[in-house]
């Protein structure tokens, strides 16, 4: 295929959405504590218990990612109490908070609802602040709009060989804004493809990447926690 023109035979874009992340239950918090900070499950439990005793988060030993419906009218006051996160809460406080069934659902809650901040803020130790921050940002993110994306599929051929690639472009960031670092240089999103026109053709430089299959990865504490949660 070297020296042969590469022709675009199909170019398709479909708009889609990335749903908001779920609120934390204890297991998902322990998973993220391990993935993001290297904390063991026991470390995360001790830290979240300390935060609960300081009254900055709700009861932590929970197995649901939902809130009870009677919490809905209390959410704006909780958000207003998050003074250090006002940059993120201002836009969602400018309009009524939607009572989404993916967040508020009495049928999905038994004794205690998902882990959320209480709106009380106080000085925290560094490791406690790390856990508090991911809980608080997750809470804020569920009230943002969904992330809108464009999913792209390109099919082309050189000689009689067909190639296919896929990519994604973020159209509206929505909840993703909550997890951006305003002080960092924005990184280019991986997998973004340029616009093509069906039938266009031109020279190309083929490249090939050889790969070998790998054995299953050894469990980390995070993947083990997730596997135990979904087993059976």
Image (tube, rainbow, N blue to C red):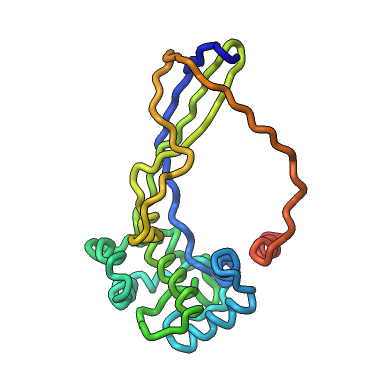
Q: Residue at x 52, y 76 (%)?
A: 112
Between residue 105 and residue 45, name the one nearer to us.
45
From the viewer's perspective, is 226 left or right of 118? right
Q: Residue furthest right?
A: 215
Between residue 34 and residue 116, name the one nearer to us.
34
Up/down of 177 relative to 47, above or below = above
Total numbered labels placed on residues in the image:
0
Between residue 38 and residue 68, name the one nearer to us.
38
From the viewer's perspective, is 174 left or right of 114? left
Locate residue 122, reporting x and y percent. Answer: 37, 85
The C terminus is located in which quarter? bottom right
Q: Residue at x 36, y 56 (%)?
A: 177
Q: Quadrant of residue 96?
A: bottom left
Q: Quadrant of residue 13?
A: top left
Q: Residue at x 51, y 81 (%)?
A: 59
The N terminus is located in which quarter? top right
Locate residue 70, reporting x and y percent. Answer: 39, 73
Q: Residue furthest left?
A: 94
Locate residue 215, reporting x and y percent. Answer: 77, 48
Up/down of 169 relative to 31, above or below = above
Between residue 6 and residue 170, name the one nearer to us.
6
Locate residue 184, reporting x and y percent. Answer: 37, 58
């Amino acid at each position: 295929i070297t020296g042969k023109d590469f022709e675009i035979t199909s170019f398709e874009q479909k708009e889609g959405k990335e749903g908001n992340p779920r609120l934390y239950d204890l297991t998902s918090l322990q998973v993220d504590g391990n993935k993001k900070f290297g904390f063991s499950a026991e470390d995360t439990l001790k830290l979240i218990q300390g935060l609960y005793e300081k009254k900055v988060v709700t009861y932590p030993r929970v197995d649901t990612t939902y809130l009870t419906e009677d919490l809905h009218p209390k959410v704006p006051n909780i958000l207003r109490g998050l003074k250090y996160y006002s940059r993120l809460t201002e836009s969602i406080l400018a309009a009524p908070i939607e009572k989404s069934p993916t967040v508020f659902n009495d049928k999905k809650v038994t004794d205690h609802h998902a882990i959320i901040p209480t709106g009380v803020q106080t000085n925290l130790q560094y490791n406690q602040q790390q856990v508090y921050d991911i809980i608080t940002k997750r809470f804020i993110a569920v009230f943002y709009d969904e992330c809108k994306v464009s999913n792209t599929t390109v099919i082309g051929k050189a000689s009689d060989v067909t190639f296919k690639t896929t990519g994604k472009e973020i159209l509206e960031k929505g909840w993703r804004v909550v997890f951006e670092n305003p002080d960092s240089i924005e990184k280019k999103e991986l997998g973004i493809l340029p616009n093509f026109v069906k039938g266009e053709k031109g020279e190309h430089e083929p490249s090939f990447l050889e790969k070998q299959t790998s054995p299953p990865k050894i469990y980390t504490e995070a993947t083990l926690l997730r596997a135990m949660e979904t087993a059976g």
